[in-house]
Image (tube, rainbow, N blue to C red):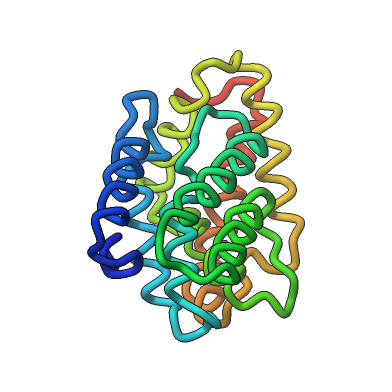
C-alpha cells in the first residue's frame, strides 16, 4: 500500500496535510468509512494500477474521497473534493493534477466513470472491491455501513440501501477495469443479491 508521503512528498506542508487526513479518517463516528477502508482502497489500487493513466493521482484521490464523512451521500463527496482543492493547492502539485484529483473524488458519487476514464475506473473499482468479500466479510461491511448511518431510521435506511443495491445489480458491469471485473464481479453480485433478499424480507434476520 502506498503511503501518503509516497504520493504527496516528504515536505512539511505535505506532512501537515497528511496529519489532517489521518485525523479525519480516524473520527469516532466512522465505522466503515475509516482508516481500514482507506487502506483497503489503496491496496486495491495497487492491484489495478497498470490500468490507470496516472496511478498516483488515483492514490491521492483515494486519500480524499471520504475525507469528509457525515453520512450524507453527495454532500460528503462535494465537501471532500473541496477539501482536496484546498489542501492540494498548498503543495507543489501542477494545477492539472489538482483538477484531476478533485474530479476523481466527485466520480465516486455514483461510481459510474465514463468508458474512457481509466483513472476513474481504477478508483471506483478499488472503492467497490469490498463488495466481493466472503459472505462473512460482506456482512461485517454491511453492519458497519448501518452503524455509519445510525442517524437514519431503520425503515428509511432499508429502503434507501435496497435502492442502492438494486441499482448496482442493474448495471451491466459493477467493475470497469479488466482486472477488477475478472477478480470481483461474480462474488460481488452474489453478495449484493443476498443482501437485497435480506433487505426486502418482511422479517429480516438479525
Q: x, y percentage for residue 58?
A: 49, 68
Image point (74%, 61%), residue name? 171
Q: Could you say which is closer to the camera, residue 89 or residue 22?
A: 89
**Vertical order, 137 against 88 (above or below):** above
> On the rendered image, what quadrant is the C terminus found in?
top left
Q: Is residue 91 visible?
A: yes
> Taking 163 as reference, is 122 left or right?
left
Which x, y percent locates residue 102?
59, 57
* Total numbered labels placed on residues in the image: 0
Residue 1: tell me if it is visible. no
Q: Is residue 194 left or right of residue 138?
A: right
Work out whether residue 143 or residue 201 is closer to the camera in this orientation and state it.
143
Q: Quadrant of residue 53?
A: bottom right
Quadrant of res 111: bottom right
Residue at 52%, 57% in the rendered image: 128
Relative height, residue 49 to residue 29 (above, below):
below
Q: Quadrant of the N terminus?
A: bottom left
The x, y position of residue 134, in whole percent, is 38, 55
Nearer-the-camera pick, 3 or 97: 97
Residue positioned 60% across, 13% down in the render: 153
Q: Residue at x 66, y 17 (%)?
A: 155
Asked where in the image residue 8 lies, by quadrant, the reply is bottom left
Q: Position of residue 202 (x, y in %)?
A: 66, 21
Amino acid at each position: 500500500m502506498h503511503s501518503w508521503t509516497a504520493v504527496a512528498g516528504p515536505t512539511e506542508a505535505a506532512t501537515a496535510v497528511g496529519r489532517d487526513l489521518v485525523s479525519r479518517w480516524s473520527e469516532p463516528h466512522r465505522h466503515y468509512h475509516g482508516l481500514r477502508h482507506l487502506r483497503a482502497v489503496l491496496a486495491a489500487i495497487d492491484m489495478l494500477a497498470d490500468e490507470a493513466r496516472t496511478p498516483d493521482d488515483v492514490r491521492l484521490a483515494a486519500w480524499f474521497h471520504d475525507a469528509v464523512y457525515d453520512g450524507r451521500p453527495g454532500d460528503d463527496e462535494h465537501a471532500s473534493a473541496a477539501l482536496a482543492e484546498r489542501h492540494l493547492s498548498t503543495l507543489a502539485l501542477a494545477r492539472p493534477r489538482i483538477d484531476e484529483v478533485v474530479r476523481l473524488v466527485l466520480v465516486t458519487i455514483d461510481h459510474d466513470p465514463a468508458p474512457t476514464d481509466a483513472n476513474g475506473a481504477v478508483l471506483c473499482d478499488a472503492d467497490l472491491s469490498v463488495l466481493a468479500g466472503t459472505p462473512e466479510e460482506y456482512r461485517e461491511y454491511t453492519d458497519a455501513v448501518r452503524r455509519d448511518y445510525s442517524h437514519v431510521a431503520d425503515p428509511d435506511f432499508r429502503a434507501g440501501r435496497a435502492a442502492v443495491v438494486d441499482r448496482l445489480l442493474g448495471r451491466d458491469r459493477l467493475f470497469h477495469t479488466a482486472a477488477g471485473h475478472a477478480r470481483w464481479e461474480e462474488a460481488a453480485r452474489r453478495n449484493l443479491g443476498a443482501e437485497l433478499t435480506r433487505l426486502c424480507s418482511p422479517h429480516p434476520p438479525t
